[in-house]
Amino acid sequence: MEHAKQEKMAESKGPIGWYVHLPFCRTKCGYCDFYSLPTLPHLIDDLIGAITREIELRDPLRAVETIFVGGGTPTELPGEALQHLLGYISARTGPVGEWTVEANPSSTTDLKLAVLQTAGVNRISFGAQSFHEDDLRVLERIHDPVHIGESVRAARSAGFENVNLDLIYGIPGQSVARWRETLARAIDLGAEHLSCYALMYEDGTALTRLKRDGKVAPCDEDIEAEMFDVTIETLRDADYQQYEISNFARDGRECRANIIYWENREYLGVGPSAVSVPQWRTAKEHSRRSQVLRMDGGLARVDRRGARNAFRTRAGGGDGGADAATDARNRFEGFRAANGV
Ligand SMILES: C[S@@+](CC[C@H](N)C(=O)[O-])C[C@H]1O[C@@H](n2cnc3c(N)ncnc32)[C@H](O)[C@@H]1O
Ligand code: SF4
């Protein structure tokens, strides 16, 4: 098809979202079953080459409204590799309304933040999880509470005006008071967006094994439900809108990539564990669909307990559901409930 014709089609169909998955992490957190690999230097060039080639082959040549580069931990890439990949993406898409990159608080440097800014990234999402040392050790995080503030301040200095923090509640040993403290610290840092997830015990993770062997006592369900209620109240009082079960944003700062996904609009997923809308899905993507339904912060965090709570308190019934289709429906219903759709 000639280029002018393609461009016309692209314009007539409306903008889409892109999700780019980068699988590297410095170490594996005990609770996480996202697909990730150690940051092995000899794999970096191959990975970047494979992703850029995949984009070249699969780009539907549509205007791009949002890009979400998630992980793994994208900022684990060395600065040069990050610059190469983001530069390629930006040359391909042109300026986009919202471009998010996920980061671990201990993986950002001023140089990498500058690389993100230069490429056109305008939203950064830090996996903060908790501001309490003990929680971070249970989760086997590599950062300390102090790194979160340092990273957010560095991101502000680099020019980021849209910052998300991922937080987790229901951590073994975490009290409601300690969770309140984490929320207060996140609010104090002025994050525009907060994703607050109930800790999930995923099959095959180290934390789930510890729980099974009686070495870790999970948080009591009632305490976890109280934490969810505390989240809603505290963030409402601090001027955050709950626009989805686990997602809270200051006015106009809702994550647009999330919304594209929840509204069942079109998105292209590239990278080793990404999934696209059905019409752009490859055979491999079909088989990994249920895994990616759990990928959050861009494309989908299925928070079963959160969904159940939301239904109990706001939509009057329902259950988180056991399969991916039910989860997806519940997530969408939760989104609708929050928006009065
Ligand atoms: C890809 S990671 C975020 C970026 C980066 N890798 C990091 O962790 O700092 C996406 C988020 O998923 C959430 N997450 C992962 N596994 C989870 C689990 N088992 N229960 C609850 N939240 C989880 C965490 O909040 C994490 O920040
Ligand atoms: S939570 Fe983030 S840093 Fe930890 S293993 Fe999962 S993707 Fe990697």
Image (cartoon, rainbow, N blue to C red):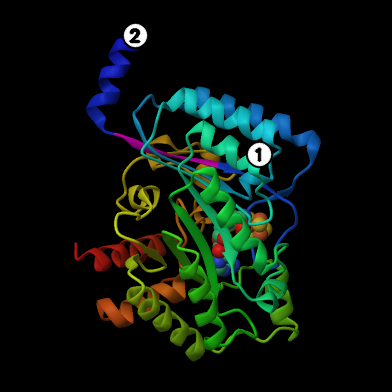
Query: Is the residue indicated by label 1 positioned so its CB lies within 8 Å of ligand 1?
Result: no
Secondary structure, mark 2, is loop
Q: Residues within 10 Å of mark 2 (few under 14, many from 20)?
A: few
Residue 306 figure quarter = bottom left
Q: Position of residue 22 (x, y in %)?
A: 61, 43
Q: Please indicate, yes or no, whether residue 288 appears anywhere in the rendered image.
A: no
Q: Position of residue 196 (x, y in %)?
A: 47, 69
Query: Is there a contact, CB below 8 Å, between mark 1 and mark 2?
Result: no
Q: Residues within 10 Å of mark 1 (few under 14, many from 20)?
A: few
Q: Please indicate, yes or no, whether residue 260 appears anywhere in the rendered image.
A: yes
Q: Is residue 325 magenta?
A: no
- Cα distance between the residues tagged 1 and 2: 41 Å
Location of mark 2 (residue): 2
Secondary structure, mark 1, is helix
Residue 174 placement, left or right of 37: left
Residue type at numbered disc 1: Leu
- Pick the quarter of the image with the N terminus: top left
What span is colored magenta in the figure? 15-20
Location of mark 1 (residue): 111
Asked if residue 149 is positioned above or below residue 185 in the image, the reply reads: above
Dot in front, 1 or 2? 1
